[in-house]
Amino acid sequence: MVASEATPYAKTGGLADVASALPRALVRLGHAVDVVIPRYRGITGGDRVARVAVPLGTSIADADIYAITEAGVRTLFVGHPPYFDREYLYGVGNDDYGDNAARFAFLARAALEWVAGTGERYTVVHAHDWQAGLVPLLLRHTLAGAAAFRRVPAVLTIHNLAYQGLFEASWLPRLGLEWELMHVDAIEYWGRISFLKAGIVFSSRITTVSPQYAREIQTPEFGFGFDGILRSRSADLIGILNGIDYDEWDPARDPCLPVPYGASRLDGKDAAKRLVLELVGLPADDEDRRRPLVGMISRLVDQKGFDLLAELGDELPRLDASFVLLGAGERRYEELWRNLAARHPGRIAVSIGFDEAMAHRIEAGADLFLMPSRFEPCGLNQMYSLRYGTVPVVRATGGLYDTVRNVDPATGEGTGFTFDEYSPRALLAALRRALDMYRNRPAWRRIQAAGMGQDFSWDSSARQYAELYERADNK
Ligand code: ADP
């Protein structure tokens, strides 16, 4: 596998979780998997196992390959300090590094040079997202003649179609790619080049991270201009729901929680709620803890519904609930939430930053989890929430649609509260339905128990990937 991030080494989002948990699950099924990621600043350790020469345009640069094996998975780190020894993975704030095209072309080429030089026989190469999008192109086009790659199919997984790796066409020669690739059936995309498109075109199979998102991205509304390309590959495109890593996310053995808990005993959840309220500076007495706490953990971007929440603003604290947000992202949303918290200090708390331990505590301590995404390829937090007895309130899109069952008002059956229309009104209505139900304690317990009983472990997803690898041919 080739990816731009993998836990525990480098993470900005769900991709990192998948690039770590999927290989581990495949290993448990008896497969052998190597994962290649960049050796970013902060990744130390590992043995240097090779040095490969990486041609990029007219120049050739060395990459030192380091290896660490954990949980049966060998991770190979591409070391090239000018590209990867930087403060951030992709850029500062919203500004991508100006040479990302070269950095991730380098990653792709270095990964394949490693494959060619190692003598190992890999049976499939699996690339993740645009950052690895050139891997299928190099494999099927530039390096297609190499013995190491004969009959080795490429699989691409799209974790988020909104990120397409678009660059000016003038990059082509600097990346060592021929102008003939500047073609609608190759890397060209409306006069520019797209790494993601290259990945889609040159892979024998394409996957995305939920069945519903696989359907949605073939429509203009969710296709970001790629719906036509994806429809033309629809026979080779499938959605496989991400699993979640229950070694990391299980309230019965989560070291971040003050008291472990499970479906039969929920006291630990109240202890976590008290801790979260105290940590973020909200009132935490017995009386205060009776008020439902709504948690959010998210990148602060439009995709996650923050434009809807911005419109609701001061309406939120008028509900009988408190809110805690952990997130980082666009400055306007950071400021908006800081201001909201300042105006409603007893009801809204905001923690700006990336904090894994706090994420675990909020998952446990919140009563409801809010995820009003405009689109959501899979989404992990709603699945963590279900496991932690924290009832999700979500927009029914992508993986949220596939994983959260709307509570039926007649029977009380379901695992969460969903809404369809992308509007502040619909969000508010769903939140109100959830808060009303919260007062009915026995009904709420049933919803919690139904969610906690769901199984989203990686094993069944990994089996689907293994079957896909078997079927993937050398297109
Ligand atoms: P995406 O990959 O689009 O950001 P996902 O729900 O698939 O969304 O995955 C997000 C992952 O990142 C989850 O594991 C979530 O807990 C984590 N996460 C997001 N923001 C933060 C944060 N500020 N602090 C800690 N973890 C975060």
Image (spheres, helix red, strand yellow):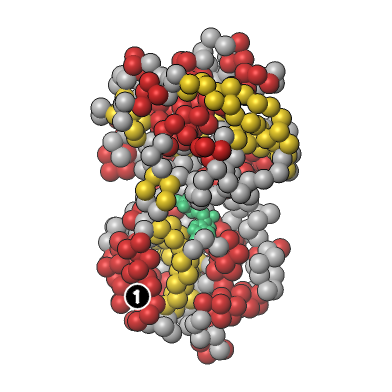
Label 1: which secondary element:
helix
Residue placed at 49% from the left, 49% from the top? 88
Quadrant housing residue 25: top right
Residue 257 is left or right of residue 194, and the answer is right
Measuring 37% from the left and 70% from the top, which residue is drawn there?
337
Choose between 364 and 103: the one closer to the eye: 103
User: Is residue 315 shown left or right of residue 403?
Assistant: left
Is 376 placed above or below 366 here? Answer: above
Q: Which of 210 and 443 is in front in this view?
A: 210
Residue 125 location (% of width, % of height)? 57, 26
> In which quadrant is the N terminus drawn?
top right
Report the residue at 28% width, 43% height from top. 221
Q: Residue 33, located in which quarter of the rendered image?
A: top right
Above or below residue 408? Residue 69 is: above
Is 338 situated left or right of 111 in this image?
Answer: left
In the rendered image of this protein, does residue 181 appear above or below residue 376? Answer: above
Number of numbered discs visible in the structure rendering = 1
Residue 230 in view (yes/no): no
Residue 209 position, x and y percent, is: 48, 42
The residue closer to the viewer here, 15 or 229, is 15
Q: Can you identify the residue that label 1 sits on?
A: 339
The answer to whether mark 1 is within 8 Å of ligand 1 is: no
Q: Residue at x 69, y 70 (%)?
A: 260
Q: Position of residue 142 (x, y in %)?
A: 47, 15
Q: Which amino acid does label 1 sit on?
A: Asn
- Residue 376 in sight: yes
Q: Residues within 10 Å of mark 1 (few under 14, many from 20)?
A: some
Q: In which quarter of the image is residue 254?
A: bottom right
